[in-house]
Image (cartoon, rainbow, N blue to C red):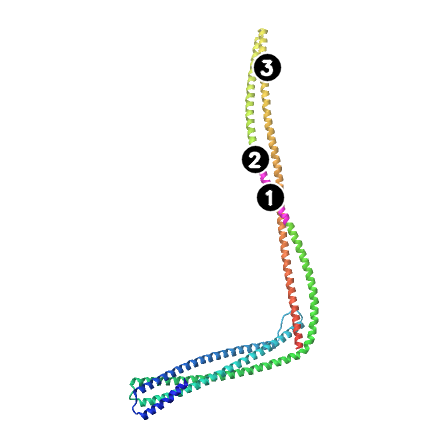
Amino acid sequence: MWNKLSQAAGLAPVESEDEKAAEKAPDIEDSKERLQQQEILIEQLKNLVRENENRFQEKSKEYDELSSKFQKFKLQSKAKISHLSSQIKEQDKPKKEDCDFDDTSSSDSSDQSRRGKMLLLKRQLEQAKQQLEKKEQESKTIISSFEKRITDLELQLNEKNNLISSLVGEQSKAKEAEAVEKSPKKETNIQEMYAQVVYKDAKIMELNNQILENEKKIMDLQEHVREKDEVLQQRNRAVQLMAEDMSRKGKSVVDELDETREQMKIMQENFSTTESDWKKELDKYKQRISDLENEITEYDKKLKNSEAAIKSIENAKYELSVKNADLQKKIVCVQESAAKQCELYNKEIEGEVEALKKSLEAEKQRAAEMQKTLDESSSQSDNKVLKARVKERTKYKALERELNELKKTAQQKPEEIVELQQRVAELEEEKGSLQLKLMDFEEQVIQIDKLKEENEMLKNSVQEKLNEVQSLGKRINEIQSERDNLEAKFKSLQDNYKQDILIIQI
């Protein structure tokens, strides 16, 4: 494209000079072709300028993104450096920790933790330095690449400006040579194109100014990075001084390690003794729990047996109550029927006795009358007397017979009464037996109440045993937690001891 433009720019003035020299009269067709060629060249230049502007905008966006990333990285590095410095300050300050051990063991553990933290801080600082160096190298490479691109773009813009200026000169010459042939419309188009070219020049100048500002920002960022490097170097010096102090203190650490070894031995012995005691207590608790479980099973069996006995007694009570109700109904019916029959027999006997009494009284009256008549008629003959006596005797015998019959009937009816009385007595005996059964049943009810009370007592005792089992389980858990804590402390002491050995070896 650049070659074509240069050739077109070089040929245009030669042809115009030849035509002026050879033919002073301009040719309309040749001028039109030249104008078309120039318009085509101008459009090509416009397209090139647009492409370059788009590329420049893309590069500026990339530059902005990289600068933002670089600032974020700087902020992160600042945060890391501040965090590390705060940790170093915290390590410089003395720390007090509440422990179950002696003051010597607590001081040893704090020194060991400080040493480990110092080593970690050194490593973190080295890693941060390496990361910063990498990021600085990357930023430098990016900045150099952007600078190269900017220089290339500037060269391209200068070349384009030169071409545009040459084209503008050619156009001005063509305008002077072909002022007569051109129409006012063509002049207006050329003026518009010239105005666009001027606008593009101004835009290019603005972009150059932006490039200069970005270069200034890059310089500021480089200075800021240098300042951060100096700060990191000072931090490294402080860490080195701290390491020297720790190496001086390392001599006293050997004696402290011997003391910690002795303490570790004592702790191991105490731990073994306490562990044996805890095992014995656990065995006792387990045996007690097994005994309580056996007692609970026995109590459950007793409860089941008592519940079965209570159910059987309740069933017997129900059956006895049913039988007692039936017997009471039967006794009431028999007593009512016997009372009715006795009343009827008594009424009949009383009626017959009264009738006999009346007849006896009547006979006595007759006898008295007869005696009177006999007394009065003593003067009568003995035959009449004998006849009267015979009649009286016969009547008396008849009356005696009637009395005997009545007595027999009276004797026969009491037998039925006796049978009824015997039946009543049997029923009363059954009633007494039922009452005895009721007494036994009441005694069984009392026993059931006692069993219920015993059952409640057993339930309470079982609940107490369960509470004891729960308390024992809690105690076992507490002992296990204490054991775990002691094991953790023992492990921490071992780890600290190993760290001290590693520090001494270093």
The answer to whether marks 2 and 1 mark residues whose Cβ atoms lie closer than 8 Å is no
Mark found first going from the N terminus, 2 or 3: 2
For the C terminus, the quadrant is bottom right
Q: Residue 238 in the image: x percent, y percent?
A: 60, 81
In the rendered image, residue 315 lying in the magenta stretch gets the answer yes
Stretch of the chain drawn in magenta: 300-329
Mark 3 highlights which residue?
397
The answer to whether residue 103 is seen in the rendering is: no
Q: Amino acid at mark 3?
A: Lys
Foreground of the two, 35 or 192: 35
What is the chief secondary structure element of the magenta stretch? helix
Are the residues at dot 3 and dot 1 in contact (C-beta closer than 8 Å)?
A: no
Tell me if residue 234 can be seen. yes
**Which one is nearer the viewer's eye here, 395 or 463?**
463
Instruction: Look at the image and say whether residue 472 sits in the magenta stretch.
Output: no
- Mark sitting earlier along the chain (3/1): 1
Q: Secondary structure at mark 3?
A: helix
Callout 1 amino acid: Lys
Q: Which mark is residue 311?
A: 1
* 481 with respect to 181 (left or right): right
Element under disc 1: helix
* Residue type pointed to by label 2: Asp
- Secondary structure under badge 2? helix
Q: Is residue 291 above or below residue 106?
A: above
Mark 2 and mark 3: span between their CA atoms?
53 Å
Q: Quadrant of the N terminus?
A: bottom left
**Residue 72, percent across and down?**
50, 77
Instruction: Read off the residue under disc 2.
Output: 326
Give residue 501's position: percent from left, percent from top: 67, 74
- Depth check, front residue: 293 or 57: 57
